[in-house]
């Protein structure tokens, strides 16, 4: 990915952790320091993940002080950690201006694999207003800066004692509504001086911003793409995802067909199953027809419930389909030869599952449903 595809060079006062290597080189040169200091500083910020310039042991104090003045750090504060029964951990971070965001560490360890996926947020709240998503109830707060995005990864690494193997931009916010800062974060995360993530290990998910998908497609190398589809007719998708009124299903799928896929990569289509809304056999049959010809896989996500406040009190807008209906939907699609998987809820007992992130206040956490063991 080239810096030319990103936003202009940050102004004086922009956070140091948001600076690209070339920008840091120019600042070091302007400060009258040797060129190699840029790499040292970048490694401290992105390979070590320091929270203060005082930790940069091999950088002269005068240069550290100059960096603090021109490009201060603004570290995220880890405000709360919750651990689910399945080992999933949800982290609530406080930003420099007191906003709350969440990210989720999801372990997937068995005899054949040892994965640790981090679900990353890109905004405070969200403006998309998907009816089945708890984050939408917050409204839109602001975009996160590239520094705030990458710090979620570095903070989670410190908490877990190991680096995540996979990054998914599926947390709070619509990543393609914050395109400049998200793509700047990708450059920082993939740079060999820092965390050196492979783009094949990074997935950016969108609710369906066609213009953003095309911009993402122009980046080289592009990350993996996931599209939150969730319906097979415009009538239903208009109701549960208002963004469909701007970019209907046909336009969205054309953007998916244009997206560059190499070395066996596929577009992931996420499909949240809502009982009686989008889970019928007819939906399964339409899904097969819609995705025909697109190298893809489908992740079925049984709806992870959350209550919304009404005049009559908290109510659930939707219901999760029965286990039998979920399996029937999967088997009907799989019979066509399409790759389709059921994503088991992870961390739903602490409201950390897909669609449940809402950065609850402390007073609300007491109302999170307690986990009770299923009788054997």
Image: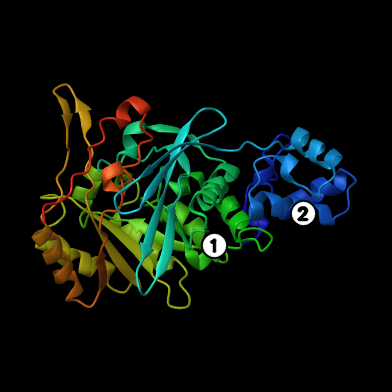
Residue at the (48%, 30%) spot, across then down: 99
On-image quarter of the C terminus? bottom left
| Mark linked to residue 367 | none
Q: Does 180 appear above or below 227?
A: above
Would you identify the image quadrant in which residue 310 lies?
Answer: top left
Q: Position of residue 367 (x, y in %)?
A: 25, 31
Q: Is residue 276 left or right of residue 301?
A: left
Q: Nearer the viewer, mark 2 or mark 1?
A: 2
Question: Residue 46: image x %, image y %?
Answer: 64, 52
Within 10 Å of disc 1 (Cα), the crowding (few <14, some 14-19, many 20+) is some
Viewer-closest of 220 and 40: 40
Q: Earlier in the sequence, mark 2 or mark 1?
A: 2
Which residue is nearer to you in this view: 325 or 244? 325
Query: Which element carries disc 2, helix, strand or loop?
Result: helix
Left or right of 115? Residue 65 is: right
Q: Residue at x 45, y 72 (%)?
A: 261
Q: Residue at x 88, y 53 (%)?
A: 34
26 displayed left or right of 200: right
Q: Position of residue 346 (x, y in %)?
A: 30, 53
Quadrant for residue 301, please give it.
bottom left
Q: Which residue is mark 2?
A: 40
Q: Is residue 108 left or right of residue 313?
A: right
Q: Distance between the Cα atoms at labels 2 and 1?
A: 31 Å
| Residue depicted at x 19% and y 76% | 336
Colour convention? rainbow
Q: Which mark is residue 218?
A: 1
């Amino acid at each position: 990915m080239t810096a030319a595809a990103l936003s202009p060079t940050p102004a004086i006062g922009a956070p140091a952790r948001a600076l690209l290597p070339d920008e840091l080189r120019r600042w070091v040169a302007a400060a009258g320091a040797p060129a190699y200091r840029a790499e040292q500083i970048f490694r401290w910020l992105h390979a070590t993940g320091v929270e203060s310039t005082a930790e940069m042991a091999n950088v002269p104090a005068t240069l550290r002080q100059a960096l603090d003045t021109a490009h201060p750090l603004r570290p995220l504060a880890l405000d709360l950690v919750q651990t689910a029964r399945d080992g999933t951990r949800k982290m609530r971070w406080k930003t420099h201006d007191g906003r709350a965001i969440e990210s989720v560490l999801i372990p997937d360890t068995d005899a054949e694999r040892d994965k640790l996926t981090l679900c990353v947020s890109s905004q405070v709240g969200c403006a998309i207003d998907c009816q089945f998503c708890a984050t939408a109830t917050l409204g839109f707060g602001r975009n996160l800066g590239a520094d705030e995005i990458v710090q979620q990864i570095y903070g989670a690494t410190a908490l877990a004692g190991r680096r995540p193997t996979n990054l998914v931009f599926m947390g709070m916010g619509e990543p393609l509504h914050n395109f400049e800062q998200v793509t700047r974060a990708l450059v920082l995360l993939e740079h060999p001086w820092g965390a050196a993530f492979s783009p094949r290990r990074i997935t950016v998910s969108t609710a369906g911003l066609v213009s953003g998908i095309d911009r993402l497609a122009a980046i080289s190398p592009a990350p993996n793409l996931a599209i939150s589809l969730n319906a097979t007719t415009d009538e239903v998708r208009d109701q549960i995802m208002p963004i469909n009124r701007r970019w209907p299903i046909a336009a969205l799928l054309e953007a998916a067909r244009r997206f560059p896929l190499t070395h066996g990569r596929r577009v992931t289509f996420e499909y949240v199953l809502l009982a009686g809304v989008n889970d019928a056999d007819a939906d399964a049959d339409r899904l097969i027809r819609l995705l025909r010809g697109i190298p893809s896989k489908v992740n079925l996500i049984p709806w992870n419930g959350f209550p919304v406040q009404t005049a009559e009190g908290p109510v659930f807008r939707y219901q999760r389909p029965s286990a039998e209906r979920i399996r029937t939907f999967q088997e009907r699609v799989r019979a066509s030869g399409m790759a389709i998987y059921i994503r088991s809820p992870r961390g739903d007992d602490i409201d950390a599952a897909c669609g449940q992130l809402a950065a609850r206040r402390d007073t609300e956490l007491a109302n999170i449903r307690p986990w009770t063991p299923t009788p054997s």
